[in-house]
Amino acid sequence: MKKIETTNAPGAIGPYSQGMVSGKLVFTSGQIPLDPQTGAIVGDTIEAQSEQALKNLQAVLEAGGASLASVVKTTCFLSDMGNFAAFNGVYARFFTGDCPARSCVAVKTLPKNVLVEVEAIAETVDR
């Protein structure tokens, strides 16, 4: 196994890694809409927060040798299922073509009271 570390996504805010590579699989921790440089929450709408969370996810995947196109499964957490359609609109810009399997659930609260968190499992890509 190999720990993923990148400055292009927020550092872990607890006892966990941004992600791990095991064999040809990349497992990311949940990515929330934090600015990687400042640690500040980006945006106050579901659209802005989803965009940043997915950019952070992409950065962790790339640091682990994967890409959005090699994602096989995502798990998405929303603070309010009323944001599902707006989240889907942003998500669809990041995942095109053969989209990965996905679970999307509403949760009571997320870290730092953000609106969205996304994690993924992907295959590494040949470089």
Image (cartoon, helix red, strand yellow):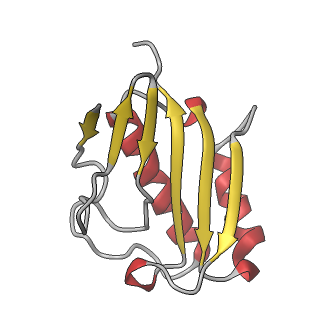
Q: Where's residue 103, x and y in %? A: 70, 57
Q: Where's residue 104, x and y in %? A: 69, 63
Q: Where's residue 46, x and y in %? A: 60, 75
The vertical placement of 25 against 39, above or below, is above
Task: Give the quadrant of the C terminus.
Answer: top left
Seen as rendered, the residue at the extreme top is: 126
Q: Where's residue 122, x and y in %? A: 52, 34
- Identified at 23% across, 43% down, the residue is 5
Is 64 left, or right, of 88 in this rendering? Answer: left
Query: Which residue is nearer to you in this view: 64 or 27?
Result: 27
The image quarter in which residue 40 lies: bottom left
Query: Which residue is nearer to you in this view: 43 or 126?
Result: 126
Task: Give the quadrant of the N terminus.
Answer: top left
Is 74 left, or right, of 54 in this rendering? Answer: right
The vertical placement of 96 against 112, above or below, is above
Query: Which residue is nearer to you in this view: 67 or 22?
Result: 22
- Identified at 53% across, 59% down, the residue is 118
- Identified at 72% across, 60% down, the residue is 89
The vertical placement of 127 against 122, above or below, is above
- Identified at 73% across, 79% down, the residue is 81
How many marks the image carries: the answer is 0
